Image (cartoon, rainbow, N blue to C red):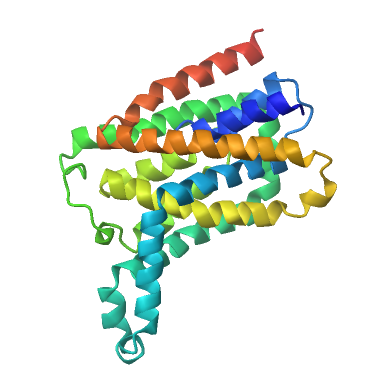
């Protein structure tokens, strides 16, 4: 892989990790059409580390609030005298535990189906179909608001809007999004919106949920560091590019969500899926 290719893939990762259009699907297609001979799963994971840094920067206030709240609650002796009451009174500790709870299904899916899911990176037809499916998923919250007027758009945002049973459902959506072509942010935010979680909180939970998922992916692939022959400056260029572009893309997505235009990305996903399908099958 050349330096230019690493930067191009870093830009793609940064743009598509947060915009609901599947970063893994874009990377799989880009690697295929750029003529790369292997899926480069480890490089893909390292690009995710770059976008993880963008999440931490954008949500540094929320992360700091959660950390301080958890430490304060754990240091409170009342927690050990009246654990249920104290736990229920701590929004921060409850929210962190919901993030951990949502991470469990993702981890199980990743461990059990790691090899099978990675093999899909080489299947352009499969990735194209999954991109089309992502487009459909993004339309589900909009369709639901037509059926049920109880939309979450105008509800007060509170971490209490995320219930215990919501976490594993969103975690399953994140686990399924390991499949290239299925957008992680698109599927998790769409499911959260369908569950009645306000858009701002849906995005916050989705992206904070991505932190343990990305760290887990890095842990699963850490052994590949020994096997990869890719120069460190190539990895570094890709990671830095994905961080800078990812930061901008995340800010853009939050604006789009606040304007209620999340489903607009449907058209892009469907068109890209159809075009890549046509190129691979016909040309």
Left or right, 260 with reference to 181: left
Left or right, 1 with reference to 67: right
Name the outermost residue toward the bottom.
81
From the viewer's side, name the closer residue of 190 and 281.
190
Residue 17 visible in the current orientation: no
From the viewer's side, name the closer residue of 55 and 165.
55
Instruction: Determine the image quadrant of residue 78.
Output: bottom left
Residue 255 image offset from top left, x and y in percent? 31, 34
Instruction: Determine the image quadrant of residue 99.
Output: bottom left
In the displayed structure, 139 sits above or below 211; it is above
Residue 107 visible in the current orientation: yes
Identify which residue is drawn at 41% across, 47% down.
58
Residue 39 image offset from top left, x and y in percent? 73, 34
From the viewer's side, name the closer residue of 83 and 135.
83
Identify which residue is drawn at 31% across, 77% down.
87
Residue 283 image offset from top left, x and y in percent? 66, 7
In the displayed structure, 126 sits above or below 72; it is above
Identify which residue is drawn at 38% across, 83% down.
75
- Give the quadrant of the N terminus: top right
Label total for image: 0
Identify which residue is drawn at 58% across, 12% down.
278
Residue 272 image offset from top left, x and y in percent? 51, 19
């Amino acid at each position: 892989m050349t330096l230019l290719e690493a930067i191009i893939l870093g830009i793609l990762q940064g743009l598509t990790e947060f915009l609901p259009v599947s970063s893994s699907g874009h990377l799989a297609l880009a690697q295929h059409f750029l003529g790369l001979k292997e899926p480069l799963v480890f490089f893909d994971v390292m690009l995710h580390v770059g976008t993880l840094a963008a999440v931490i920067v954008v949500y540094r206030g929320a992360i700091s609030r959660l950390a301080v709240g958890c430490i304060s609650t754990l240091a409170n002796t009342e927690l050990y005298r009246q654990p249920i009451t104290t736990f229920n009174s701590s929004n921060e500790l409850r929210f962190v535990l919901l993030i951990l709870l949502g991470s469990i299904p993702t981890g199980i899916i990743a461990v059990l189906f790691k090899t099978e899911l990675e093999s899909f990176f080489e299947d352009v037809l499969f990735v194209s179909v999954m991109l089309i499916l992502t487009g459909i998923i993004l339309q589900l919250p909009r369709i639901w608001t037509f059926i049920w007027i109880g939309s979450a758009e105008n509800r007060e945002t509170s971490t209490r809007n995320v219930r215990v049973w919501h976490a594993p459902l969103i975690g399953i959506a994140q686990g399924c999004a390991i499949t290239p072509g299925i957008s992680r942010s698109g599927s998790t935010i769409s499911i959260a919106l369908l569950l009645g979680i306000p858009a701002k909180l849906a995005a916050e939970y989705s992206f904070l949920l991505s932190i343990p998922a990305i760290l887990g992916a890095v842990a699963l692939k850490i052994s590949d560091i020994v096997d990869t022959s890719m120069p460190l400056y190539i990895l570094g260029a890709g990671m830095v590019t994905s961080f800078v572009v990812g930061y901008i893309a995340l800010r853009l997505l939050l604006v789009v969500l606040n304007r209620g235009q999340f489903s607009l990305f449907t058209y892009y996903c469907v068109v890209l899926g159809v075009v890549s399908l046509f190129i691979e099958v016909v040309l």
